[in-house]
Image (cartoon, helix red, strand yellow):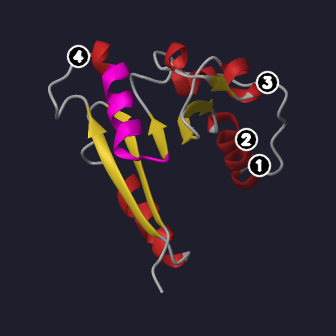
Amino acid sequence: MSRLAILAGLIGRGIQLSRTPALHEHEGDAQQLRYLYRLIDADQLDLPDSALAQLLDAAQHTGFTGLNITYPFKQAILPLLDELSNEARGIGAVNTVVLKDGKRIGHNTDCLGFAEGLRRGLPRATRRHVVQLGAGGAGSA
């Protein structure tokens, strides 16, 4: 019996040391999926930020089903998408793109991930006010 194949990746800069491919592929194996996760590093490819549209087109035409988006593209990708989730629209940044039925659908899981990490790591912490150091796409969440 052949396993379902999924092709996904990460678009960003300076991502060669990312542990994300191993994490995704390991989980794919655990779920009995043939999960291929590729890095699309604009630095490694020697591409300017303006090549984001071409990278997205190439991933879509190659058969990628989804992409994670990281620095510096979380906000720059917004006008290249067909739809945005409520979270992505509210935050003004995208970290996940689902490529389905010819559409590019942007999502943002940063806020949920941060909130869940805070809930688990500091269960008794008051959550009314936050001091944020830093900014960018994840900082928007």
> In the rendered structure, are the residues bearing label 2 and label 3 in contact, judged by CB atoms less than 8 Å apart?
no
Residue type at the position of mark 4: Pro
User: Relative to 19, does residue 79 appear above or below in the rendering?
Assistant: above
Residue 14: image location, x then y, percent:
26, 34
- Counting residues from the N terminus, which is met first, the one under dot 1 or under dot 3? 1
Under circle 2, the secondary element is helix
Residue with the most extreme bottom position: 1
- Counting residues from the N terminus, which is met first, the one under dot 2 or under dot 3? 2
Res 48 label: 4
> In the rendered structure, are the residues bearing label 2 and label 4 in contact, judged by CB atoms less than 8 Å apart?
no
Judging by the rendered image, the residue that carries numbered circle 2 is 115
Q: Which residue is drawn at 20% across and 29% down?
A: 43
Res 129 label: 3
- Counting residues from the N terminus, which is met first, the one under dot 1 or under dot 4? 4
| Cα distance in 3D space between marks 1 and 2 | 6 Å
> In the rendered structure, are the residues bearing label 4 and label 3 in contact, judged by CB atoms less than 8 Å apart?
no
Judging by the rendered image, the residue that carries numbered circle 1 is 119
| Cα distance in 3D space between marks 4 and 3 | 38 Å
The residues colored magenta run 52-65
Residue density around tag 4, few if under 14, some if 14–19, many if 20 or more, within 10 Å: few
- Verify whether residue 62 appears in magenta: yes
